[in-house]
Amino acid sequence: MPDALIRQRATTVQFSRARTAKGRREDCFENVKGAFAVKASGARRLRGRRVLLVDDVFTSGATLSACAKALREAGPREVDVLVLARAVPAMEV
């Protein structure tokens, strides 16, 4: 159901936020807080079902968390996450 979850407000780019300074991970979570929602038609289809949320790259986890929260509020039995890649911060020399 690729159309069940929608972005209801614009957010800034997450990747640059996660790399700016120590302690900025919290900024990523604040940036996407409340940005995603499940459409009413999607909520009816998701209720009681097991949902698989797919993301291309896991950086801070903020976007996945916000999406999973919106999905859980729609009443599925379970929300699982599949990530294709994990961004790893550059090592400091």
Image (spheres, grey):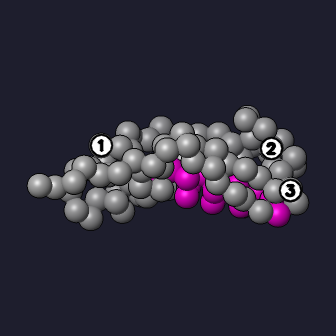
- The amino acid type, in three-letter code, at marker 3 is Arg
Please give left or right for residue 90 compared with residue 46 in the image. Answer: left
Q: Are marks 2 and 3 in contact (CB under 8 Å)?
A: no
Q: Can you tell which of label 1 and label 2 is closer to the viewer?
A: 1
Q: Nearer the viewer, residue 41 or 52?
A: 52
Quarter of the figure that contains the N terminus: top right
The stretch in magenta equals 62-77
Dot 2 crowding, Cα within 10 Å, few <14, some 14–19, many 20+: some
What whole-number distance in Å separates the C-alpha atoms at marks 2 and 3? 11 Å
- Magenta includes 66? yes
**Quarter of the figure with residue 70:** bottom right
What whole-number distance in Å separates the C-alpha atoms at marks 1 and 3? 35 Å
Q: Are marks 1 and 3 in contact (CB under 8 Å)?
A: no
- Residue 28, x across and y down, in percent: 39, 54
Nearer-N-terminus badge (1/2): 1
Would residue 83 be visible to someone looking at this image?
A: yes
Please give left or right for residue 51 compared with residue 63 in the image. Answer: right
Dot 1 crowding, Cα within 10 Å, few <14, some 14–19, many 20+: few
Would residue 8 be visible to someone looking at this image?
A: no
Q: Residue 49's mark?
A: 3
The dominant secondary structure in magenta is helix
Q: Which residue is mark 2?
A: 42
